[in-house]
Amino acid sequence: MSFIWSYTKNNVAYAEVRSTERREKGETPKSKPMYLGKVIDIEKGIFQNRKLGIFKYDLDSGYDTAGVKDQYTRQRLKEEKAILDFGSSHMLHEYYKQIVFLDLFRDTLPKYSDSLMAMIFYYIEMSESNSEAIRWFRGSIANLLFPEARLQSQHISELLSKLGDDAVVRDFFSEYLKKYISPNNKTGVIVDSAGSPNAIHFPITAIGNQNGEISSDVKLLFAIDAKSGMPFFFRYSAGNIVDINILKHTIYELEKFGIDIKYSLLDAGYCSEENFKAMYDSGVNFLTRLPNNRKIFNEAFKTYKEEALSDLHRYVYHDGIVGIKRILASLYGNKGYVYLCVDFNKRN
């Protein structure tokens, strides 16, 4: 019967495979121990010697070197042994344990949970590129909190690819909103989108127009709780999808997630007849800036400009003076108000 025997020499653990055998007193053993080398992780059967480098060995399947060296060379052998950066990661870990997100993050991708949490901490604490994550990890208490994390560049890319899967994103926000949003609680929502310029060759990169700037980008859309600033959800679309085509689907998704929208604050890019009617049909109050090329704006400006400039409609706002004229208007067949505003500090 064979077994793995470990022993310590000069404060370093070594291992070898030995066999039990019956022999008479004074008889020389017939079998010789098989040297495995330095012990990296005895529980997982990870060893190192000059011939094989870092490898895995168990009595049933023998030697296995595939992928083992990459996993353990940097992370296990060269990690900081004496002093670990304690404060930031410990504080974050204690904070996440007190709120709903720690288990939620771990359940998002169970197979990658330690890597995911380590990268979340890295992004919060540091501003360097992903290639520096492994160096930070070796010197941080995070490597004790998340011992199974694999932060080599190729593993980070694999993790981010998994996180970008639509099914993962939908499942995450479905569970997140159940914990974060109280049932039947009306709330305000801020909806905005931004172009993310890039030169990556994948299907959703497209030529788009963001605030008059033409670039190759991906469009990122965010729906934010107006009161707390916490995100309801986010998603991405091709860079050539214009804002006015996004809003209806966003409101529909929020309602599908059970968010009862009381009002919404919208970017000027969402101003269109279709979107205004969608807001009225959904019973959602909204506030948005009117672009100056809209007929509604030009009619209000032409008719009520002088009134907005008059002393009757002047108000103190913070450290400045503003003029505000509220105008009852028809917004594509629906009753609403246009606010014609003047910032006198800038005007002067």
Image (tube, rainbow, N blue to C red):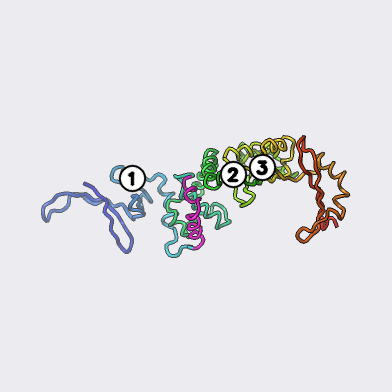
The residue closer to the viewer here, 245 or 253, is: 253
Residue 49 visible in the displayed image: no
The residue pinned by badge 1 equals: 63
Sequence-first tag of 2 and 1: 1
| Image quadrant containing the C terminus | bottom right
In the rendered structure, which amino acid carries the disc numbered 3?
Asp
Residue 315 placement, left or right of 246: right
Image quadrant assignment for residue 164: top right
Residue 244 placement, left or right of 144: right
Horizontal and vertical percent position of residue 6: 28, 56
Q: Main secondary structure of the magenta part?
A: helix
Residue at 50% of width from left, 60% of height from top?
91
106 drawn magenta? yes
Q: Secondary structure at mark 1?
A: strand
Marker disc for residue 228: none
Residue at 80% of width from left, 47% of height from top?
326
- Which one is in front in this view, the residue at disc 3 or the one at disc 2? 2
Horizontal and vertical percent position of residue 109: 47, 44
The span shown in magenta is: 87-107
- In 3D space, how far apart are the residues under numbered discs 2 and 1 (Cα atoms)? 47 Å
Q: Secondary structure at mark 2?
A: strand
Residue 128 placement, left or right of 332: left
Q: Is residue 274 above or below residue 114?
A: above
In the rendered structure, which amino acid carries the disc numbered 2?
Phe
The residue pinned by badge 3 equals: 217
Residue 260 placement, left or right of 331: left
The residue pinned by badge 2 equals: 233
- Which one is in front in this view, the residue at disc 3 or the one at disc 1? 3
In the rendered structure, which amino acid carries the disc numbered 1?
Tyr
- Which one is in front in this view, the residue at disc 2 or the one at disc 1? 2
